[in-house]
Image (tube, rainbow, N blue to C red):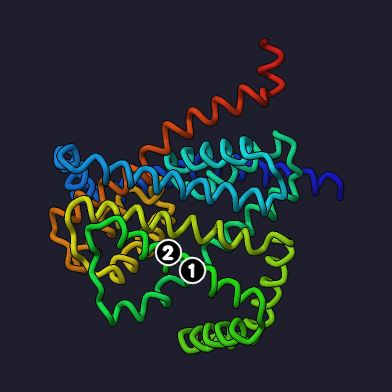
Amino acid sequence: MRQADGVADNDHSGLRRWRRPAGRVLALAVMAVSLYVLAPSLTAVFASWRTVIDLSPAWLGAVVLLEAASFVSLWDLQRITLRTRDWFTVATSQLAGNAFGHAVPGGLAAAGALQFQMLTRAGVPAVAVATGLTAASAVTLAMLLALPVLAIPTVLAGTPVNRTLTEAVYVGLAAFILLIGSAAVLLATTRPLTIVAEIAQSLRNRVRRHHPPATDFVERALRERDALRRALGRHRWRALVAAAGNISLDYLALLAALAAVGSQAPRSIVLLAYVAAVLLGLIPFTPGGLGFVEAGLTGTLVLAGVGAADAVVATLVYRLAAFWLPMPVGLAAYGAFRHRYPSRQDGAHG
């Protein structure tokens, strides 16, 4: 019996060794095909770089500053969920993980794995890292998915983007307040969350009518809500403010990019385009959704009424600040982290 177990273990380990390189080859193949299919959109976006040079430096600076503030909000949220006051460790690990996730296929998982490794090396307990990062992701994703619902009234109103900083600030502030309010209601009360879970369960059962009906959506939603409450602890309100700031400031960066090219598209449609772009960024076929985001954001902005040329330039400006610029910053952050927390091998060589 012991021998059989050992043989089985050897077989499984061999299978795992075979699957790992095969999985990498498959991931690279899917990425290559995806980039080939999306090459026209990517080429059109990158070809507009000369136009970016002619844009107002003030608006370009505003896009970069808004993205930087969005990152700071995310670090504050993670500090709360990780129950640590260490800005350096949280910021450098998030920047490094983000950069790594933008460089390899399946970036979201890769980014999380690297940040997990860095945080635990810095002394944060592994359990706290796992629950903290999960809670931070859950809060931001829930707020992101709430944005289309919150945008419905303004979709009907059709208010355009105004090329003034004051107007952009008002839009971001409104989104900020709505996000915090809706999240607070769902965390503090039971009935709204129950209604949402019941609707989701009903839709699931209608779509999958040939499968056994689901009956536990409400119970699962309440259980996850309670777990999230525990993860946020007594800093719940501050965590909600940080999560809302992370999303609202990122959305404001896109609005600033559109204002830089003189767009007058309806803000509500731009909001839906923003949500679609963020979700496309989660597609694991290319690093950071590269190609998918460019094609999807450009296309949805055109549908929103932005001119094709302006949509391409605005997309490039936004992606430069949100995707490309954080990569060298993340590399520098990783170097700073390794300097403060050298590995045992580094110490041995030193």
Give neighbour class at mark 1: few <14, some 14-19, many 20+ (Cα, 10 Å): some
Looking at the rendered structure, the kind of residue marked 1 is Ile
Where is 40 relative to 182, above or below?
above
Residue at 48% x, 68% y is: 177
Return the residue nearer the eye: 331 or 263.
Answer: 263
Residue at 41% x, 47% y is: 67
- Mark 2–mark 1 CB contact (< 8 Å): yes
Q: Secondary structure at mark 2?
A: helix
Please give left or right for residue 1 compared with residue 160 in the image: right
Residue at 60% x, 57% y is: 136
Disc 2 target residue: 173
In the picture, the disc for residue 177 is: 1
Quarter assignment of residue 262: bottom left
Please give left or right for residue 325 compared with residue 246 in the image: left
The answer to whether residue 165 is visible is: yes
Quarter assignment of residue 195: bottom right
Where is 236 relative to 57, above or below?
below
